[in-house]
Image: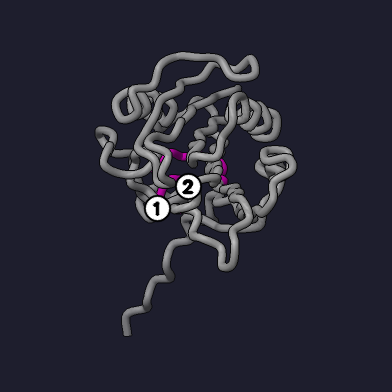
Amino acid sequence: MTPVEAAPRCTTTRPLTGKGQVPLDAVFPGAETSASSDPEEVVPGADAADRARCPGELPSEPRCDGLVPWTGLLPDELVPASRARRVVQGYLLTMPKQAGNQAPPESSAGTKVVTFSLVDLAAGDPAGLTGYLRVAFEACAKATSSTVAGVAALVGTVPSEYGAGSAEVVLLRRGSHVVWASLDGSGWKAGEQRQALVVLVGRLL
């Protein structure tokens, strides 16, 4: 009988260690009702160095009809494609109290949502992820250069998924850490989005 080769172990998903925890009450202080995710991290698996068994590459161009960051890749696909050392994803959501049953976040006028991803790049960024992300943010979100909490950033907008008309998307890099985030919803007051980004910079970069 021909032996059956075991499936390659290209990635491993595990509980978060190190950078990546973002306190909900820091982003949404005094929120009436809130929800948050417990982010996990995806890291290279035991066979990741074997490119024949664990192939992957970034798309040739951004897929602007998809979701940020327009790669069309799930985290366990992004790790081999980008040669990253780690990928973390998380989200934070708050909405006001509703009379009776809670309305879905998508229809609540006071919803605020932050989704974020953190990538720890391999030395030298061998797959060129940062270059891909810059092109994608400029093409898909019409992003322009800015500064957030002293960190160079690209800031643009995409259609809202929470009834706000548009959502702000941000790309940040410091050293080997790359972060992209989306701030959506119609409940934001003046200055709150900027403060949320300051928290992300402090916790993720």
Q: Position of residue 21 (x, y in %)?
A: 69, 44
Residue 74 seen from this side: yes
Circle 2 crowding by C-alpha within 10 Å: few under 14, some 14–19, many from 20: some
Left or right relative to 135: residue 145: right
For the rendered model, the colour scheme is: one colour
Residue at the spot of label 2? 49
Q: Position of residue 190 (x, y in %)?
A: 59, 25
Residue at the spot of label 1? 54
Which span of residues is magenta-colored?
76-88
Which amino acid type corresponds to the residue marked 1 in the rendered image?
Cys
Do the numbered discs 1 and 2 sit on residues whose CB atoms are within 8 Å?
A: yes
Name the mark on residue 145.
Answer: none
In the rendered view, would you say 29 is above or below 107? above
Residue 87 seen from this side: no
Decide whether residue 77 is among the magenta residues: yes
Label 2: element kind = loop
Residue at 55% from the left image edge and 15% from the top image edge: 147
